[in-house]
Amino acid sequence: MNGYIVGQQVINGLVLGAIYGLIAVGYTMVYGIMGMINFAHGDIYMISAYLAAIFLALLTGAGVQSVPVALVLVLALTILFTAFYGWTVERVAYRPLRNSNRLAPLISAIGVSLILQNYVRISQGARNQGIPALIEGHVRVNAADGVTIGQVTYTQILIVSAALLSMGALAWIMRHTTLGRSCRATQQDRVMAELLGINTDHIIATVFIMGAAMAAVAGLLVTLNYGSFDFFIGFVVGIKAFTAAVLGGIGSLPGAMLGGVILGLCESLFSGFVNTDYKDVFAFAVLILVLVVRPSGLLGHPEVEKV
Amino acid sequence: MTPLLTVRDLSMHFGGVAALQGVTFTVARGAITAIIGPNGAGKTTVFNCLTGFYAAAAGVVRLQREEGEIDLMRAVHPTLQPRDYLNPRALARQAYGWMTGGTHKVVRAGVARTFQNVRLFRDMTVLENLLVAQHRLVERRLWAGILRTREYLAAEAAALDRAVAWLELFGMFEDANRLAGELPYGQQRRLEIIRALCTDPVLLCLDEPAAGLNPRETQALSRMILRLRDHHDLTILLIEHDMNLVMNISDHVVVLDHGEVIASGTPAAMQGHPAVLEAYLGVAEPVDGASGGGLREEVVPVSSLPPVPPKPRPPLIIDPSVADIEACPP
């Protein structure tokens, strides 16, 4: 087996997995707290890719020359605006259905997904949009004996480190701040949390904002890496990220990250060695296998019936 | 002295079934009030109406705080006044109010409650459970938490102090860093009460706190409740089936049956009250041969019996010195 291809596919898989993981966090947090699958989350990610491109164009137009400065500003603006989208979706489409039948918010989520896709299609056009490559260059990765086993672009390094950094930050917030503590409590028993004086509406809104912010990071990174996107990218990536969340154990933050990386590796290794066309089939076959052996996912808790 | 809590004409129905019909009672400040009654009498429904789980069909629930009177039911389920129709904020609040409820407002008003079953955050430590309960008392803005502002750290330290003080008081300090789900059952129940206390309530509502406890734990529980009343200025409202506990610690007893208050008064008065006997035993007076059977169906209808002169009835309570369960061999 060719060491170069293995190494390169592992690197590609890790990058893909980092993106999946970032988006999967949004699914898993919302599921953990509300028991609901937010199918519009993939489209929030798609919106963030557009927002990132728009802000990049605006900043370039405004005369910002330095790439790092532009990236930091674009990141901040994209997070801010995408978070606003996430918050609005929760407020408009899910909160009114909070106490209704479990299926109602699900259908509402599909509706929101369609609305967001068509809103972008009408306002931005159905054609592929693109941005020029901002970060050029790559480094070679050598094995111990000096043989090159792959190359990593600077953008890929940026993706993985930004993903690790933002997931670390999120995990730290959930672990070490008052708000995170209340989020975890709300996740375990919403009714009881409310009875201890926590305004769970605020907590849920915060969770949507955090999920959207993570998707915004993913959107910007993907835009930088691939340079092209259209109004439909949210669908497939959303489904994959959801798969990653289920694979890792839905409701669990580390599970989402782990699931993303495993899914990314599966996809890229399979397409590198077997067949590119069937990579999704393989990824979902892995999902089914894991669910047969561990129905609650790799790191998930078995569902406890709440009385 | 005005009562702390006034419940007047509280009514609630599920479909066509009337769960509560005109329930009226008061809870005196600094006293222990017990709500008793047979299963299905509507005791927990009263609690659910008080704490905003159910929007009662009719009635008034008022909490008398030092800073003024709080209408609990309007705080949780706001109803529109005529002038509010011109106020967009009030309209919006109403629209979201009935969508989501908002039982956290009851806690802010000063009412804490526990449930019949243990509802701890099992995957969090004992201390974390208590800190979560102080959510409304601490600095909870995200930025303050990330930047570790001085106010945030001071509020966290104060919350930790309060939690530790309660734990020490009730002998659970050693368990502070254990996961709540790992504790033995009796301790979990005690932790639930401590957690409710951490919300800094004036009225503590306990739903069957002694359920599933052994006699020794029940005794500890009654000492705990008495201590809260005597030394911590708390008013306690409890639902309980353990008559021994109720008769020993409560200052006032409200008896519910079929969603109505059938009697209320001191524990001693309730023990011999005919309506209470009727509800519990099925007859107004214990008849020979019928006093042992607590089931309604087995008892001869009262109307078909010749009038029996009143006579002293056997006490409902079991004297702990007689029924020394601990001394029995296993």
Image (spheres, rainbow, N blue to C red):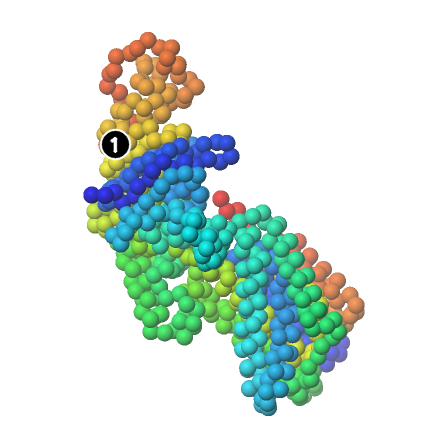
Q: Residue at x 54, y 77 (%)?
A: A76
Q: Quadrant of residue A106?
A: bottom right
Q: Is residue B70 left or right of residue A119?
A: left
A137 or B43, which is in the foreground?
B43
Residue B167 shows up from this direction: yes
Amino acid type shown at disc 1:
Gly
Residue A192 shows up from this direction: no
In the displayed structure, A71 sits above or below A35; it is below
Where does residue B102 sit, x and y in percent of width and height? 44, 52
In the displayed structure, B78 sits above or below B317; it is below
Q: Quadrant of residue B296?
A: top left
Q: Residue at x 28, y 41 (%)?
A: B27
Where does residue A172 sit, x and y in percent of width and height? 47, 70
Q: Secondary structure at mark 1?
A: strand
A154 or A54, which is in the foreground?
A54
Residue that carries the numbered disc 1 in the rendered image? B265
Q: Residue at x 38, y 73 (%)?
A: B148
At label 1, counting other C-alpha atoms closer than 10 Å, the crowd grade (few under 14, some 14-19, many 20 or more) is some
Where does residue B24 sit, x and y in percent of width and height? 33, 35
Q: Is residue B222 left or right of residue A5?
A: left
For disc 1, the chain is B
In the displayed structure, B119 sits above or below A263; it is above
